[in-house]
Structure formats: structure tokens, C-alpha cells
Image (cartoon, grey):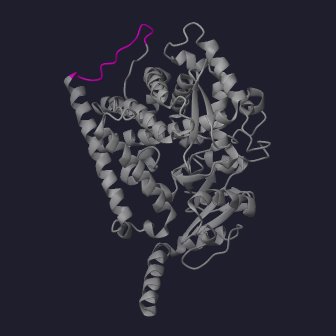
Amino acid sequence: MDFVLAVVVCFLGLVLALPVLKRRKTFRRISYYIDQLPGDKWYPLVGSVVSLWGLKREDLFQAMANRHLRLGPIFRNWYGSLPVVHLYKPEHVQVVFKSNTNINKGVFYKYLFPWLGQGLISGSGPKWRVHRKIITPSFHFNILDSYGEIFAEKGACLAKYLQRFEGKGFVEITGDLTKIGLDIITETAMGIKLGILEGNNTEGVEYANAIMSFLQVTYRRVANPLYNLDWLFKHTAVGRESERCCSVIHSFNQHIIQTRKRLLEAQGGLAVEEDELGRKKKVSFLDLLLNYQRSNPFADEEVEDEVSTFMFGGFDTTTATLTCAFAALGNHPEYLARVQEELDEIFSDEPTRKVTPQDVARMEYLDRVVREVLRCFCFVPFIYRNLDEDIAIDGYTIPRGANLSISLYNLHHDPDHYPEPFKFDPDRFLPENCAKRHPYAFVPFSAGPRNCLGQKFAMRNVKALLACVLREYNVKCQQRLEDIKYTIEIVLRPVNGLHVALERRK
């Protein structure tokens, strides 16, 4: 038995060392510079992440965030044979975000390839630059205005759905918020109504479940060095589940793409209706890409990659923002009252009418609340880069080939820029307070050449949904903000969900 164990250990050691052996010269240079940084003790095969082993699901994220408190604003870790440099100070991340060269995503994004392919989030290189240029016009304000009707319709649907929870005490709502997020993103991305919230589309529910399961599997790959090996991963139960999810997702996507493509060809191109003000009405992201494809080289595979990227970037962040907004306002009735006072003024002419893009633009206090939610909860806690050229930060050389982990969570809770960083305070985002801070102290949508194209879409979407719910309901949250623990599943999620009570406003 001991002999078998020794053979297995040696075999795994060789497998984990193969990436290093293949890049010996490059690796020696990276190792030389990386090991000048502070960091946890290194151990053979496993690297320097032993302190994270054995932690409970609800303790892992906080332990990861606390490493900056122990090791400083810049440190290194070895994940097996993979060296990663960790940053969070705004003056440090500015060096990375402003670069037009160091824009390639870190190695961990490769686990998203089976779903997202080489889309804007996961892709790199010349192809990414071309796609970025093609897709940028899709987020023009005229297009965003056309999505406003969908936001309003889904917001009204959510408010109506929540009626079932009136007077029922505290209920868990993250699952329902996930459904509305998927409903919105599938209609804006693909032009189809799934009705997932109402549960009247079994194919749509299967699609939604496959996406959620794939994201959970993806994080398990990130957390387990052995799953880094594709040939080993595909023979595990987790690998087979990943393959099943991708099959469901791709089959659904391809069916929708081909259906919309035939429709577009039948009508001779994209027929865009306009309202009396000349604004475009209800044009899906997919239709825009397919219309571009008619006269430009853009493969169906590329179309699917970008539609999937739109889906990935939209629904999870919508769900997380709504969840955390309910948590924050449910703990702070004074802020909830100010939001509702603003909404009452905006809708004083007709309290029950649909929310319009013009209404959303007037929601200045709600805008501050959402920004403080993005800062305080920071549900996209880390961004990763792989360096194409050396950079110098705080007297250290970070060599090309190294991976960087930028902790947005630590950045957004830096007491040097946010006094009492764990206190929820929307007035941090008053214009005069923003002007005093470092320009890279708040970057929930990243920054620089790889910033999120959909950030205005996201803000409009969330504000419209919150307005629809909060002008009808008061919200209370069972958990105190300081008691909520989170787990990482690509984005942060409350470990035990979120329990809120809803009461109709008088």
C-alpha cells in the first residue's frame, strides 16, 4: 500500500511539474523576481496556499481577502507551479489598468472557454481587439434606451411576483432574483422571452440550470490544482458534469442563433423600428451581431461566443446587485426612505406608470446607493491578468509571463480611501467625495482598455428593477450586514442565501 501511495505521489508530482519543465528558462526568470516579494511559505508540489486548505466553504473567501492584511499591499503566492502576484492599492492597479500592452486575461479564465470561447471577457490578442471594436457600438445610448422597455416590463413582473411573499415573514429570494436576471439577459441578448421566473418554459429552466451548474464547476476547477489538467478533469464526475452543461448551453444557443438568422434572411436584413423620437426599439444583441455578419466575416462560433459573454456578464451581476441592494436597504430604513422619497417625486404624475430611461436618469440617490452596493459587497472580488511585458510597482519588478490577481474587494475596502470601509454609506458617492479619491479607488467594472462595455447597461437595468420593487414595497433583511458570509462561485454569493420580508407601502 505504501509503495502504491509513493508511486501515485511521484506521478502527481511529475504531472504538476510538467508546465515548469516545458518553460524552464522563462520560469527561472519569473521565479527570480517573484520570490523577492513577500509571501506565504512555499512547499513542494502544492506551492504556498497550504493556509487555505481545509477551510470551510464560508471561511475561504475571507481568508483569501485577509492575506493582504498579513502580507501587505503586494505579495506573491505559488498555486502549485503557478506564480501569482496579488495587488490592491489604487496606485498599483492603475499601472496595470492603464497599460495598452498588458491586457491579456489571467490563466484562470481558460476554465470559461468551454462556454464563452474567445469572447470579450475570456479572449485575448488581435481577435479580441477586433471583437471589441465591432461590439462597442452595440452599447450606444440609443440601443440602451431600446432595452429600457424590457427593464420596465421585467421590473413590473418581479414586483407582481413578489406579491406572494407579502406578510409571509422572512423568505429566501436569491433564487427568484437569479431567474429575473436570466429572463432579462436572454431577452436583451437573444431576443427571446423564456419566462423563467414564472416557470412556464421547461427548456429555458434547463438552460438556466446548466449555466448555474457550469459556473459552480468552473470555480471548483480554479480551486483544485489537479483539475487544471484537462485530460484528468474530463474523466472526473465534475468534468462530465461540465461537459453535460456545455452541451445543453451550446445546443440552446445554436438553435436560437439559427432561428434568428433565418428570420433575418427572410426579411432581408435588420428591420429596426423607431419611435417618434427616432430611438431604436427592442433590438437584441444577437440581431445586431447577425446583421453585422451579413456583410462582414464573422463566424457563427464568434457570434455564439459573444452572446454567451453578454449572458455571463449580465445575469450573475444583476442577481448579485439586486440581492445585495435588498440586504443593504433592508438593514438601513433611513436610506430606503430616501430612495422611496426620490421615486415618489419622479412618479408623482402617475405612480403606477412604467419606468422609462428618462426616469432612470433622474434617480441620483438610487444611483449612489447602487454604487455603494458595488463597493461594499464587491461581488466580483478578483480580476486576473497575464503580463506580456515587465512592469515596475513599488520598487519591485513583476516579470512578463507572471499572473496578476487584482483584489477589487480589498481595493474597495481600503481605509486609506474609504474611512470605516465596512460601513454602508451612499454619500461616499456624492460628487464632492468622489473628487477627493484616487481615480482608480472604485473600479467595479474594471478600467482601461479592458473595462466592461456593459456597465451602463448594468446600472440602468438594476436601477429600473429596484425602482419597480421599492416604489411598491418596504424591505427588511433578516441578516445583519456584518453577519453575512460569502462563498465564491465566480461571483460572491451569500452562503446561506438572503432572507427578506416584504411589506406593501401604505
Whether residue 412 is visible to the viewer of this picture, yes or no, is: no
**What is the quadrant of residue 80 in the picture?**
bottom right
Apparent side of residue 223 relative to residue 130 in the rendered image (left or right)? right
Does 155 sit above or below residue 131? Answer: above
Which region of the structure is painted magenta?
A: 267-278
Q: Quadrant of the N terminus?
A: bottom left
Q: Main secondary structure of the magenta part?
A: loop
Please give the name of the residue rendered at 46% of the width and 89% of the height, measured from the top-left corner: 6
Query: Is 215 in front, or is 475?
Result: 475
Q: Quadrant of residue 277?
A: top left
The picture places residue 101, in percent across and down from the top left corner, at: 56, 50
Determine if the magenta segment contains residue 307: no
* Residue located 67% across and 55% down the image: 87
- Quarter of the image with the C terminus is top right
Observer-nearest residue: 394 or 455? 455
Residue 212 % position (x, y): 42, 48
Q: Can residue 179 be seen from the camera position used here?
A: yes
Whether residue 482 sits left or right of residue 186 in the image: it is right
In the figure, 391 relative to 438: above or below?
below
Q: Is residue 349 above or below residue 342?
A: above
Residue 297: percent from left, percent from top: 30, 38
Kindly identify the residue that appears in the image at 77 percent across and 43 percent down.
417
**268 in the magenta segment:** yes
Q: Position of residue 160 (x, y in %)?
A: 46, 24
